[in-house]
């Protein structure tokens, strides 16, 4: 059942960073979040340590917040957590999996790679690390952690905090360039997916089959559900965008793009329009095959109309015959390295996908697997 998503925000109480369990003096892992206040009072007489860095920890417990451990303020530990929004969320996901009968561990530490997974799930022959990421981390750090899990045969799945969700419409959200690294594709035949969870409202957001219409704005299949109403396997059930609604939305976006003025702070867009002007063109006079949506647009650094117009002006108008390598070289600074998307194994390249689309609509002719001819009757 579709639901409207209330506003979610991250809550950091006094700057503290939380851990739900810690190691005691005898090496036993103590889950303090499961204890009542009397039990916690007894535990205050003991000493506790971080499972990763072995630094001493403090017990934090009150009437409002989930009982937890916290590093001291001058801690150098890089696994010190993200706050109550994050801790409540991973606890929710952990209990959700336990209720389904799965073998699951909270805050599992992998000594071999010196990483702590929020949740570790073992099922049949698969070992899965679930990361619930609410704070911003660099793409380099995310890739490092992802590769760390894979190096020991663990499958990483990342769920973003819903405080990072920027909804633009019923079927549209904006995904920052940093958050695009969290796009999943579990098999090349399956749709792109990204997951969000709100620990305030207990809602899981599954967004699939998304396609980028700008550098950040997307259209896809958006599903918002109570976590308790879903099973683990629901995360991997394919959901596809409505093609008719998408076509209508894209046409609206394209019409707005042709007609809207450019704010002066959009430097890249301003430079591109000046470049068009030097070629005696503008957004109104560009042919209709500029700004065509493609499924692999997420791999491009620039908006679709920018790199597609570069092909049109610098290649199609100048050459009758060209190769895929020439097109790739022309746009070499416009697309990301495949390492930018560690949770995807791309089976197609956006430039190749776009050229094949132009072949289907009669703009180009495919002479061979790597060679194309411009159809001068249409260009």
Image (cartoon, rainbow, N blue to C red):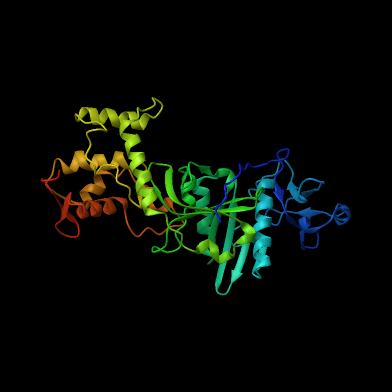
Question: Is 334 on the left-hand or right-hand side of 150?
Answer: left
Name the spot of residue 343 as percent of width and height, x first: 46, 57
Seen at 39% across and 30% down, the residue is: 266
Which quarter of the rendered picture does the C terminus lie within?
top left
Q: Judge whether residue 116 can be spotted in this image.
A: no
Seen at 61% across and 66% down, the residue is: 121
Name the spot of residue 111 as percent of width and height, x first: 63, 61
Seen at 25% across and 39% down, the residue is: 309
Name the spot of residue 159 as percent of width and height, x first: 56, 54
Name the spot of residue 173 as percent of width and height, x first: 48, 44
Vertical comparison of 90 with 65: above or below: below
Closer to the camera, 99 or 137? 99
Q: Quadrant of residue 276?
A: top left
Vertical comparison of 236 with 250: above or below: below
Which quarter of the rendered picture does the N terminus lie within?
bottom right
Closer to the camera, 140 or 283? 283
Q: How many marks?
A: 0
Question: Is 207 on the left-hand or right-hand side of 348?
Answer: right
Q: Quadrant of residue 264?
A: top left
Closer to the camera, 364 or 349? 364
């Amino acid at each position: 059942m579709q639901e409207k998503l209330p506003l979610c925000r991250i809550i950091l109480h006094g700057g503290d960073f939380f851990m739900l369990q810690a190691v005691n003096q005898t090496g036993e892992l103590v889950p303090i979040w499961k204890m009542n206040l009397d039990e916690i009072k007894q535990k205050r007489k003991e000493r506790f340590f971080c499972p990763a860095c072995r630094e001493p920890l403090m017990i934090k417990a009150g009437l409002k917040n989930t009982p937890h451990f916290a590093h001291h303020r001058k801690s150098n530990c890089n696994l010190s957590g993200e706050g109550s929004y994050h801790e409540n969320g991973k606890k929710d996901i952990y209990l959700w999996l336990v209720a389904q009968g799965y073998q699951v561990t909270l805050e599992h530490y992998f000594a071999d790679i010196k990483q702590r997974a929020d949740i570790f799930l073992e099922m049949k022959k698969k070992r899965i690390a679930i990361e619930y990421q609410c704070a911003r981390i660099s793409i380099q750090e995310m890739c490092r952690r992802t590769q760390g899990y894979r190096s020991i045969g663990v499958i990483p799945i990342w769920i973003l905090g819903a405080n990072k969700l920027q909804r633009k419409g019923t079927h549209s959200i904006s995904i920052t360039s940093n958050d695009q690294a969290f796009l999943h594709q579990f098999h090349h035949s399956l749709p792109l997916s990204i997951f969000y969870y709100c620990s305030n409202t207990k809602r899981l957001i599954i967004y699939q089959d998304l396609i980028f219409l700008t550098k950040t704005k997307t259209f896809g299949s958006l599903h918002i559900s109570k976590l308790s109403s879903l099973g683990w396997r629901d995360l991997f059930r394919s959901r596809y965008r409505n093609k008719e609604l998408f076509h209508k939305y894209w046409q609206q976006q394209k019409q707005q793009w042709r007609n809207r003025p450019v704010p002066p702070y959009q430097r890249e867009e301003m430079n591109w329009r000046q470049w068009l002007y030097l070629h005696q063109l503008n957004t109104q006079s560009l042919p209709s095959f500029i700004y065509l949506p493609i499924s692999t647009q997420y791999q491009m650094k620039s908006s679709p109309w920018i790199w597609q117009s570069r092909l049109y002006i610098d290649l199609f108008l100048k050459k009758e015959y060209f190769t895929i390598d020439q097109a790739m070289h022309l746009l070499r600074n416009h697309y990301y390295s495949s390492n930018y998307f560690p949770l995807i194994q791309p089976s197609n390249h956006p430039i190749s996908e776009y050229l094949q689309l132009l072949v289907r609509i009669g703009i180009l002719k495919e002479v061979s697997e790597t060679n194309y001819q411009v159809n001068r009757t249409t260009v």
